[in-house]
Image: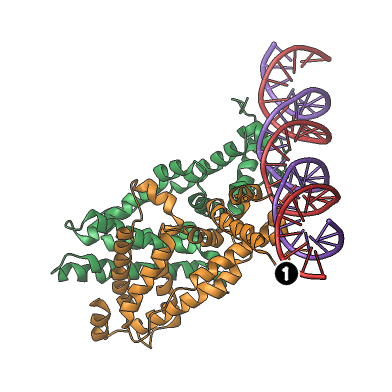
Chain colours: A orange, B green, C purple, D red
DNA sequence: CTTGACTTCAAACAGCTGTTTGAATGCTGC
DNA sequence: GCAGCATTCAAACAGCTGTTTGAAGTCAAG
């Protein structure tokens, strides 16, 4: 019996405590380095609690991950009436803030970063539920900025250029802080960063505008 | 006794075989997932060989890593007589090729990617010996493209924008192949990718040129 | 109170890990 | 051949891991 159908209040309490503790530990140490004992210790639960409530360690990880996915779903895409260059700005800012913000539930950003590096199987769910929609949204923005005649491959590469700039801070933070000690991701720094990436990307996109489209270029540039 | 001072030929043979095998296994699985037994098995050596030749698993990892670092040192920076935008092109191409090329010693790219994510202590050496010089080289290029009056913070952020685009393919490959099955990093694809990043970045940089510098912009753009 | 389902607990289990040991082997210089 | 050294080997060790077990506890319903 992996998980009982009806859970009482105190049962749900330790279950939730396990989820919260597991989120932290998994984010800190990754799936394999995190130990069930450490998670249960932080949750104030018995070692057998994980297996009782989630079947096994992998089940707990999946539960934590899906819980984190639902939190991401709160991302509200901007209406398409807004100009594309403004939607790009909002997109980049939301993306950066979600990953770097050292706010309260700091772990689900790290968690997803780890999943990208060491896929454990739930990565497919993550791609389907969260990443692919976001990526499609960005593709729509870029396509609007580049015009109908832009090739799919060009649009795709431009999207990776934009996302790459954002994700870099997530994956390479250990190196960045060694290159520049005193690097902190405060709210202001994130704002400045997203503004920089937006400007850089809007200009960079103009390299792939169809020839003889000076009017469009100026439109995409005057951000 | 960690390592004997004088090593005979066959001794050096198994030592080298251990280094090669460890490079593959560490790159594939990371430091913690890699097992001494697997490494020794691939090297055709006894389990105790690692401890005999390198002291312990960490010692083997350090040796592999420093060996990989010496290989990277073969990167030849272009003379500064070449125009900056051409040096940027060469830099990006070399960077991408070094990390993505599925050539013979395919492992030291992956190895460094893993080290960025899960620093094991040798990361400091890596930053000092390899990453910082490369980063300084890129800073020099970007500064030349942006002009003397560009602020340090702007130059720095532009460098991260450029490197971020390159590193993205290294860290997020699991996601990218799920978003676009059939994605392969052939020699041609790497060429096209580096060309794209170069164009995108050269244009993106112009967003941070000092105002009223149309002449410089055209110089940086006509790549 | 008694029943019964749900939950917690301490203890142990089996498996894999890096590491050590001490004997056996191979090679070199005498 | 022999001593001395570097190297290899099979076996075992100690530690940590996820997981299981069976008893004890908890609480609501009859």
The quadrant the C terminus of chain B occupies is: bottom left
Left or right of residue D17, residue B116 in this image: left
Question: Residue at horizontal 63%, vertical 64%?
Answer: A62
Return the chain for callout 1: A
Left or right of residue A196, residue B75 in this image: right
Q: Nearer the viewer, residue A127 or A204?
A: A127
Work out whether residue B102 can be spotted: no
Q: In which quadrant of the rendered view does residue A140 lie?
A: bottom left
Question: Residue at horizontal 59%, vertical 47%?
Answer: B31
Question: Residue at horizontal 36%, vertical 62%?
Answer: B162
Work out whether residue A150 can be spotted: yes
Pinpoint residue A180: horizontal percent, then vertical percent: 34, 48
Identify the residue under disc 1: A5
Left or right of residue B17, residue B90 in this image: left
Pinpoint residue A198: horizontal percent, then vertical percent: 31, 70
Under circle 1, the secondary element is loop
Left or right of residue B172, residue A209 in this image: left
Q: Nearer the viewer, residue B200 or A104?
A: A104
The quadrant the N terminus of chain B occupies is: top right
Pinpoint residue A52: horizontal percent, then vertical percent: 72, 58
């Amino acid at each position: 019996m992996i998980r009982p159908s009806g859970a009482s209040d105190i049962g749900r309490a330790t279950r939730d405590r396990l989820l919260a503790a597991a989120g932290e530990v998994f984010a800190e140490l990754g799936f394999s380095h995190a130990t069930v004992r450490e998670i249960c210790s932080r949750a104030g639960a018995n070692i057998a609690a994980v297996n009782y409530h989630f079947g096994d360690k992998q089940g707990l990880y999946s539960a934590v991950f899906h819980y984190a996915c639902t939190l991401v779903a709160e991302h509200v895409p901007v209406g398409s009436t807004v100009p594309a260059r403004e939607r790009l700005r909002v997109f980049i800012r939301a993306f950066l803030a979600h990953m770097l913000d050292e706010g309260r539930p700091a772990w689900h950003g790290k968690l997803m970063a780890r999943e990208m590096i060491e896929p454990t199987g739930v990565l497919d769910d993550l791609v389907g539920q969260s990443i692919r929609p976001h990526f499609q949204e960005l593709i729509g923005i870029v396509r609007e900025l580049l015009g109908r005649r832009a090739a799919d491959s060009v649009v795709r590469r431009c999207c990776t250029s934009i996302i790459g700039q954002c994700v870099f801070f997530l994956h390479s933070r250990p190196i960045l802080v060694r290159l520049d000690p005193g690097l902190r991701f405060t709210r202001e720094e994130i704002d400045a960063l997203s503004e920089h990436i937006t400007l850089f990307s809007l200009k960079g996109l103009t390299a792939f505008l169809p020839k003889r489209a000076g009017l469009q270029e100026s439109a995409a540039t005057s951000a």
